[in-house]
Image: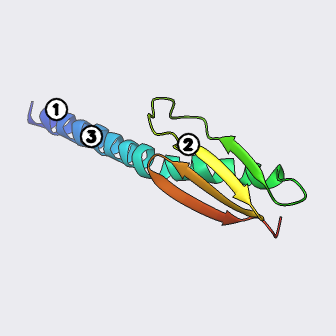
Amino acid sequence: MKEATGELNMTVITVVAIAAIAALFTIFIMPQIQANIAMQTACSNIDANGNYSGTIEGNAGSDAQDENTINCTNFTCTAKYNGRTYTKNCSGT
């Protein structure tokens, strides 16, 4: 019986550790990946003057007017996503 309890404890610890890692990935890393994909797409679609304007999918519940937007001016793209601002220079693409 003691062995079964020990195995159950290790299973619970493993499940909790996997859930914690998944939560950290979802909260911290996934928004940055989505913003980078959106900025790469914007860099691919800029006009001859280096301008582009669009939205980033994924956070439809935002009330802020400029949240989840991406704007490119003079080959420099700025994305506002999940309360953070990301910037990328598109002149090399």
Q: Residues within 10 Å of mark 3 (few under 14, many from 20)?
A: few
Q: Position of residue 91 (x, y in %)?
A: 81, 69
State which tag comes first along the sequence, 1 or 2. Answer: 1
Q: Quadrant of residue 92?
A: bottom right
The residue positioned 17% from the left and 38% from the top of the image is 9
* 40 to 87, vertically: above or below: above
Q: Residue furthest right?
A: 48
Amino acid type shown at disc 1: Ala
Mark 1 highlights which residue?
4
Q: Are marks 1 and 2 in contact (CB under 8 Å)?
A: no
Say which of marks 3 and 2 sits in front. 2
Crowding at dot 1, Cα within 10 Å, few <14 / some 14-19 / many 20+, comes out as few
Of mark 3 and mark 2, the one earlier in the sequence is 3
On-image quarter of the C terminus: bottom right
Residue 60 visible? The answer is: yes
At mark 2, the secondary structure is loop
Left or right, 34 with reference to 63: right
Discs 1, 3 touching: Cβ within 8 Å: no
Between the C-alphas of marks 3 and 2, the distance is 32 Å
- Asked whether, in this view, residue 3 is left or right of residue 20, the answer is left
- Residue kind at label 3, given as amino acid type: Val
**Amino acid identity at mark 2:** Asn
Tell me the CA gap for discs 1 and 2. 49 Å
Query: With respect to residue 18, does 75 lie above or below?
Result: below
Q: Residue at left 45%, top 29%?
A: 61
Which residue matches tag 3? Answer: 16
Q: Residue tagged by mark 2?
A: 68
| SS at mark 1 in the image | helix
Q: Nearer the viewer, mark 1 or mark 2?
A: 2
Residue at horizontal 76 percent and vertical 50 percent from the top: 52
Task: Give SS at disc 3.
Answer: helix
